[in-house]
Amino acid sequence: MADQPVSPSVNATPQMPVAGLGQSTFPAQGVPVFHRFNRLGLWTLYMKEVRRFFKVQTQTIWAPAITTLLFLVIFTVAMGRGGRMVLGVNFATFIAPGLIVMGMMQNAFANSSFSFLAGKIQGTIIDYLMPPLSNAELMLALIGAAVTRAVLVGLALYGAMLLWPGVHLTLAHPWAIVWFGLMGAIMLATVGLLTSLWAEKFDHNAAVTNFVIAPLSLLSGTFYVIDNLAPVFQTVSRLNPFFYVISGFRFGFLGQSDIGDTNLAVLHGALGLGVLNLALAGLVYGLLRSGWKLKG
C-alpha cells in the first residue's frame, strides 16, 4: 500500500545528510573522498616533517654545517700547504664543493631514516598510515622534507665557505650544481626511507650510517681525484654512486671533473643518477605498498 514504508534497495548507497548544507551529504563509509591527488594532505605531512627538524635547527642544520667545516679546516691545514693545486685550483677550493654536497647527502639520509623508525619505536607509526594519503604521496612528503633539510645545510655551508680564506667558488655550470645536488639529496633521502622501513631499532640505523653511508662518502673522491689511484681502485670508485654526485657537483663550480675528459661524460653521470633514483624510488614504493615491516 502507498502508506507503507518503502524498503531501501539492497544496492543503494547509504548517505548521511549534513546539517545546514541542503542536499549535500557525506559519502558512504569506505567510499574514497580523494580520487586523484591529495595536495593538502601531502603539504600538511611535508610541513610537519619540516617543522620537526626546524624546531631543533641548531642540531639539524647548524651543527652539521660546523662539523663539515671542520673537515675543511683539518684537510686544508694538513694537505693544503705549499700552494698545492688540484684540477687547476688550490686544494681548499677543490675540496669545498665535495664537502658541501657530502653534508647535504648525509643530512638527507639522517632526516628520512628517522621518520618511520621513530614511529615504530614510539608507537606513533599509525600517524603515517591512517591519514588519507596514497603511498606515493607519503613517500613524496617524507623525501621532500629530507631534501629541504639537505638544501638548507648546503646553503649554510656555501655561505660559510664563501667567507673562508683561500676558497673561491664560482658558478661555472649552475645546472650541474642544481642537478647533482638534488640527485644526491634525493638518493640519500630514498635510501634513508628504505632504512627506516627495514630498521627496528636505532642501532640498525646507526649501522647503515657507519658501515655504508660514511665509507661511501669518504671514499668518493671528496679529498682526492681518482686518477691518483691504482687502476683497480679507480674502477671501484666508478662503481660508487657517491663519486658521480660529488664529482658532478664539483664540475658545476670548477668546470672540471674526474668523471671524464668531456662534458658528455658528466652528462652520462647525471643521467645515470637519475635512473638510479627512479629505481630506488620504485623499490621504496613497492615496499610501502606491500606494508613491509609497517603493517605487521
Image (spheres, rainbow, N blue to C red):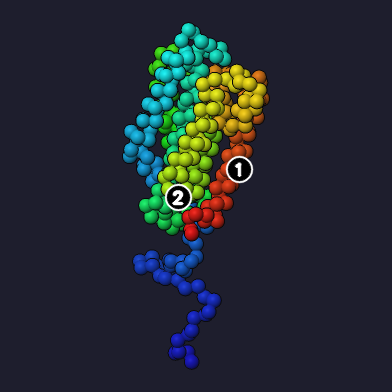
Residue 260 as seen in the image, left or right of residue 167: right
Disc 2 crowd, CA 10 A, few/some/many (<14, 14-19, 20+): some
- Asked which quadrant contains residue 232, the reply is top right
Rendered position, 148 above or below 169 = below
Residue 37 visible in this rendered orientation of the protein: no
Q: At numbered mark 2, what does the secondary structure look like: helix, strand or loop?
A: loop
Q: Residue 37 has which mark? A: none
Residue 113 x, y percent position in the rendering: 45, 43
* Front-most of residues 11 and 68: 68
Residue 116 x, y percent position in the rendering: 44, 49
Residue 120 as seen in the image, left or right of residue 176: left
Rendered position, 131 above or below 85 = below
Residue 235 as seen in the image, left or right of residue 291: right
Q: Amino acid at mark 2?
A: Glu
Q: Amino acid at mark 1?
A: Ala
Residue 40 x, y percent position in the rendering: 44, 50
> At 52% across and 24% down in the image, what residue appears?
222
Residue 9 visible in this rendered orientation of the protein: yes
* Front-most of residues 285 and 33: 285
For disc 1, the marked residue is 279
Disc 1 crowd, CA 10 A, few/some/many (<14, 14-19, 20+): few
* Front-most of residues 257 and 145: 257
Work out how far the residue at label 2 is from the one at label 1, CA to CA, in angstroms: 24 Å
Residue 156 x, y percent position in the rendering: 40, 27
Q: Are marks 2 and 1 in contact (CB under 8 Å)?
A: no
> At 51% across and 10% down in the image, what residue appears?
84
> At 50% across and 12% down in the image, what residue appears?
90
> At 63% across and 21% down in the image, what residue appears?
230
User: Which numbered mark, 2 or 1, is in the foreground of this view?
Assistant: 2
Q: At numbered mark 1, what does the secondary structure look like: helix, strand or loop?
A: helix
Rendered position, 132 above or below 212 = below
Q: Residue 200 has which mark? A: 2
